[in-house]
Amino acid sequence: METFRKEKGLEGLRLEKRKIQTVQINLGNRCNQSCRHCHIEASPRGSKNMDRETAELITSKLMESDIRDIEFTGGTPEMNPNLRFFIESLSGNGKTLTVRTSLTVLEMPEYQKYLDLYERHRVRVVASLPGLFQDSIDSQRGRGVFEKTIRMLRKLNERGFGSNGLGLDLVYNPGGDQLPPPQKDLEREFRQVLRERYNVEFNNLICIVNSPIGRFRRLLEKSGTVESYLNVLKDNFNAETLDRIMCRDLVTLDYHGYVYDCDFNLALGMTVRGYEDKRFWEIDLEGFRPYISLSEHCYACTAGRGSSCQGEVAHASGMRESVRAYYGEKLKSSSDLKTTACCPSEALPVYVSEVMPYIADEIKEKFYGCGSPIPPAIKGCTVLDLGCGTGRDVYIASKLTGPEGYVIGIDMTEEQLEVARRHIDLQMERFGYERPNVDFRKGYIEDLESAGIEDESVDIVISNCVINLSPDKDRVFREIFRVLKPGGELYFSDVFSGRRVPGHLRDDPVLLGECLAGAMYIEDFRRLIRDLGCMDYRVVSRRKISLDSPEVEEKIGMVDFYSITVRAFKLDDLEDICEDYGQVAIYKGTVPGFPHYFDLDDHHRFITGKPMLVCGNTASMLQKTRFFEHFRIVGDRSVHYGPFDCGPASEKTGDDNNCSGGACC
């Protein structure tokens, strides 16, 4: 079990890895540039390059694992011929691929082919841009690099990178022995200058802190500033970063396949403790929880501004603190909210409304939510509520699961949890239960493992207007599908947007607390869960949100917001469009509270006893989940009749339809 020392400094700290989410593959030290800050000292003369046999062994191991995020670095990865093999082998298998490139290498004729490869396989591109003007770039990375970089950024923009769901992130690091500015402020400057002067767009700017190793350390030694720079890093130690630094759930592989806690440790030859002689494919990842090898260079990742390749980690802590303060201190009841985003307007389902009289008044008064994300037919299930607050939905689910069920609530706000826990005995007495079937835990929805939620241990995950508040939604959904059992269901209500929220508004404390600043663009949500292997989700209900506050309207009135209730199942046979196999579903009328019909979503109403032609995805949702006992499915997938007669969401128009649908609409 890891131990956290929250006082200043890393000395004596025992920091344990969590389950590995990301594998970073260093293909070698060959690069078309020789940057003065490079910690692995890459150059055109680099001779350490991964061979095909090693690449194949790594790929086989990754295909067997549930690790989703794969990053390629170097050197510059394009200069290793195995990069194409990796991308073509791993793409389309539920993996998200990132290439950390010098960018200028793509101007070289022999490597221009990678532009097509990246576009075709939707590879996220991360490129260094440590300044906005030629003098600063060329002094750090070489003469002529700035002009080449701008040309390549424009070419990537032309192909949809930086928009249309193709990721293009930039990396900034200082030119010398100082910390970078705050990431969000610098990103705003970069976005403005690159747009106005060079007509370049990008998704995110990642600020990193230079680690005192490699070429950068030699520069410090030459100027006699090693000690002073280390003191700056130590003086800026931020214990909040320890929960989210990249080495907690990442491993880096060298060109031989040996494993390291991070790219910096690789540069120093510090293999993972206890696995010094093991290659990646020889490791049992299920039991892989070593202590991280720490040294003085690790202060670069805890200086509060950046965590190596992952960017500023304090930003997430700041967002969390803003949300915690808004819901724990500023809001005393739901009447204090400025908009209707976190207020349900639709009638509760009968099976939910029948439980409401049993819920304590204080719990209901301090409830903030935008829907009713509690599905029917959950008796005996294990339910997890993300961002449970004062526990209203936990207690409703507690009653609906019955005493044989179990409901866990996760929240990061102690003031909210204190209210929830204070009423456990009262609620159990009202429900007539001999012992509690609820458990409230403090934690982050991005890290359910730290809250003790094991793999494939939950039948249903619910959430009520909370995921929009997370600074790392990708990680939230990864955790959800990790903890769900096969056939399990995600059923949540949240605020979505009809367009992406402008970057400069995403950290506004009022807009964030009102569930607007963090709203996901509905198409980005679709792409995100698709990349996690969930090819089809369903909209259960949807309403447009009214911005009733002049203050809020003035800030963000250009964006249309919707409260949407979504259901998605953890099934391995869903397809990205509806396919027709001639299957028929017949509802038995046995879901509690629904004797005459059952609504799977906003366009599938099953009348009791009436045969209904369904696509293959819908058949699986009814046959391979807890609903199987309530339906009879006729037919299988042995004969295919082409696409199911069902229009995609993109063909719908109008305010009532432009923000709904998964594969089947």
Image (cartoon, rainbow, N blue to C red):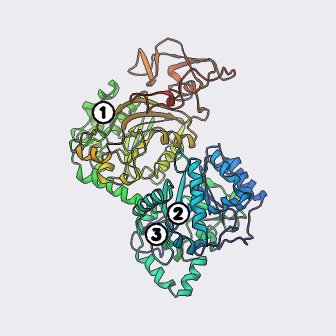
Where is residue 16 shown, x and y percent of the image? 52, 63
- Element type where label 3 sits in the image: loop
Where is residue 42 shown, x and y percent of the image? 66, 71
Where is residue 627 shown, x and y percent of the image? 50, 25
What's under tag 2, amino acid-wise? Val
In the rendered view, tell whether residue 350 sits above or below residue 57: above
Disc ID at residue 338: none
| Residue toward you, 540 or 3 | 540
Q: Residue at x 57, y 24 (%)?
A: 619
Disc ID at residue 171: 2
Q: Distance of mark 1 from mark 2, alpha carbons?
A: 55 Å
| Residue toward you, 437 or 81 | 81
Residue 409 in sight in this render:
no
Q: Which residue is mark 3?
A: 302
- Which-is-in-front pick, marks 1 and 3? 3
Cβ atoms at labels 1 and 2 below 8 Å apart = no
Cβ atoms at labels 3 and 2 below 8 Å apart = no
| Residue toward you, 101 or 245 | 101
Sequence order check, earlier mark of 1 and 2: 2
- Element type where label 2 sits in the image: strand
In the rendered view, tell whether residue 258 sits above or below residue 124: below
What's under tag 1, amino acid-wise? Phe
Q: Distance of mark 1 from mark 3, alpha carbons?
A: 48 Å
Callout 1 crowding tier (Cα within 10 Å): few <14, some 14–19, many ≥20: some
Horizontal side of 248 relative to 256 (left or right) equals left
Quadrant of residue 582 within the rendered picture: top right
Q: Which residue is mark 1?
A: 431
Cβ atoms at labels 1 and 3 below 8 Å apart = no
- Which-is-in-front pick, marks 1 and 2? 2
Furthest residue in direction front, as rendered: 197
